[in-house]
Image: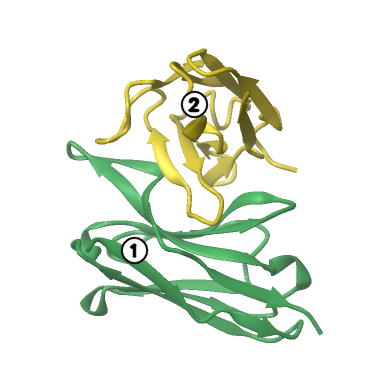
Amino acid sequence: QSVLTQPPSASGTPGQRVTISCSGSSSNIGSNSVYWYQQFPGSAPKLLIYGNNQRPSGVPDRFSGSKSGTSASLAISGLRSEDEVDYYCAAWDDSLSGPVFGGGTKLTVL
Amino acid sequence: DVQLVESGGGLVQPGRSLRLSCAASGFTFGHYAMHWVRQTPGKGLEWVSGLSWNSGNMAYADSVKGRFIISRDNARSSLYLQMNSLRAEDTALYYCAKEYCSGGNCYQGAFDLWGQGTTVTVSS
């Protein structure tokens, strides 16, 4: 059971905008930055969003993040077939003194 | 190339020990906090342990506290994880990960460089 809650799946059609939600608590999302990772099968996770809504160099601006209270969202616009992979949210947890992750969302491009 | 390469995984019996290593290259290893994160099909991603750049601060997940020990050798650009009293639930793919820093700020819990992982299987 993951500390952060994500829907196990999400879907959209090419060109569409989709969002993936992530729910936490006051000890993690409520008081710390949220991160998002993208993971291709057989590969390590890749940092997609940091500081709630910042993109590391090289990440397309089709990907955006937001946070409100104890929840966060990842939005992907202009959906492409290559976006059909797994996405994880994460945040530092003050109670655990370490980062916690969501269970992951598998995105399907219809 | 900027990379992390883990090694030391394998099949081990419950109660035994294993030591994982992570060799870093292509960046100034001693400037960054480093972490171990594990992944299983059933439980997803789980942070295991983290260590500050100078080994002054270390932290562990409750699930491994008292059994695992994280350490580093900045002269060798290497990170280690000594895993003792292993349990079946420790079975996972273990990643070494570098903490992300940008513009003079470092982001606790954000990892911008990961290794390819090393598999640990605890079974009799």
Left or right placement of residue B26 versus residue A75 in this view = left
Q: Which chain is green?
A: B
Name the residue rendered at 24%, 61% in the picture: B2
Mark sitting on residue B56: 1
Asked if residue A40 is positioned above or below residue A6 in the image, the reply reads below
B73 in relation to B91, above or below: below
Question: Could you say which is closer to the camera, residue B90 or residue A20?
Answer: A20
Q: Position of residue A108 (x, y in %)?
A: 63, 29
Q: Is B6 in front, or is A109? A: A109
Q: Secondary structure at mark 1?
A: loop
Quadrant of the snapshot with the C terminus of chain B: bottom right
**Which chain identifier belongs to the yellow chain?**
A
Residue A45 seen in the figure? yes
Residue A6 coordinates in the image, percent (x, y): 66, 29
- Figure label count: 2
Q: The disc labelled 2 sits on which kind of residue?
A: Ser
Task: Kindly identify which residue carries mark 2.
Answer: A31
